[in-house]
Amino acid sequence: MAEAQNNSGTTGKPADGLAKLIAGLLERADEYGDAMAKRISREVNDSGRGCVSPEDLRAACRAELRNILRALAGQAPVDAEVGADTGRRRAQENVPEATLLAGYRIGIRYVWELLNAEAAATGLVGPGDLVAAASSIWALQDAMIASTLAGHRDATSARLWSGE
């Protein structure tokens, strides 16, 4: 029996191509996480405060990128603790919420651009599948930001209560 063609112009299940594409991205997650960190450093305007060390930003970007890629591939639900931990650390470093949010927006845009570039380069995912992935990306962004802000607010409250 022949496989049906899906709306992306490829054969097989739409998720198959996306899963293969994401598997390739996960193999290079450190490299892409480092590139994400550079972009965030370049584009986030935190008034020159330099609150976050480059090493910590790279580590956070690597962890967050793996988290979102695994969730997009359906390997695991998004791990809220990854974002909460980042939020707590950023609160301890006095990173304002607005700066934190700006970093996440830049990071998720980087993920979207990465998916598009990889789809174009490999042909594993067509336009229809990318549109479907977009909905998942924006939902993941909301979940990640919510957990990160919760961690940030918890750490900020704890600091205020302790009199720091």
Image: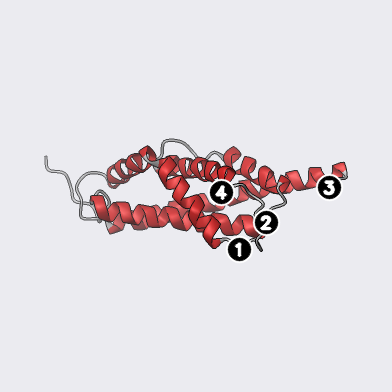
Q: Residue 131's quadrant in the figure?
A: bottom left
Q: Nearer the viewer, mark 4 or mark 3?
A: 3
Q: Alpha carbon of mark 1 to alpha carbon of mark 2: how far?
A: 12 Å
* Element class at badge 4: helix
Is residue 82 positioned above or below 9 on the image?
A: above
Identify the amino acid type marked 3: Leu
The disc at residue 45 is 1
Query: Which of the two labelled residues, at mark 1 and mark 3, occupies the earlier sequence position?
Result: 1
Say if mark 4 contacts mark 2, CB within 8 Å: no
x 30%, y 41%: residue: 20
x 86%, y 41%: residue: 162
Q: Nearer the viewer, mark 1 or mark 2?
A: 1
> Horizontal and vertical percent for residue 84?
63, 42
Q: Nearer the viewer, mark 4 or mark 2?
A: 2
Residue at image mark 3: 160
Query: Which of the two labelled residues, at mark 4 and mark 2, occupies the earlier sequence position?
Result: 2
> Horizontal and vertical percent for residue 8?
25, 55
Q: Residues within 10 Å of mark 3 (few under 14, many from 20)?
A: few
Query: Which of the two labelled residues, at mark 1 and mark 4, occupies the earlier sequence position?
Result: 1
The disc at residue 97 is 2
Is residue 133 positioned above or below 31 on the image?
A: below
Residue at image mark 4: 143
Query: Which of the two labelled residues, at mark 3 and mark 2, occupies the earlier sequence position?
Result: 2
Identify the amino acid type marked 2: Glu
* Element class at badge 2: helix
Query: Which of the two labelled residues, at mark 4 and mark 3, occupies the earlier sequence position?
Result: 4
The disc at residue 69 is none
Say if mark 1 contacts mark 3, CB within 8 Å: no
> Horizontal and vertical percent for residue 5?
19, 51
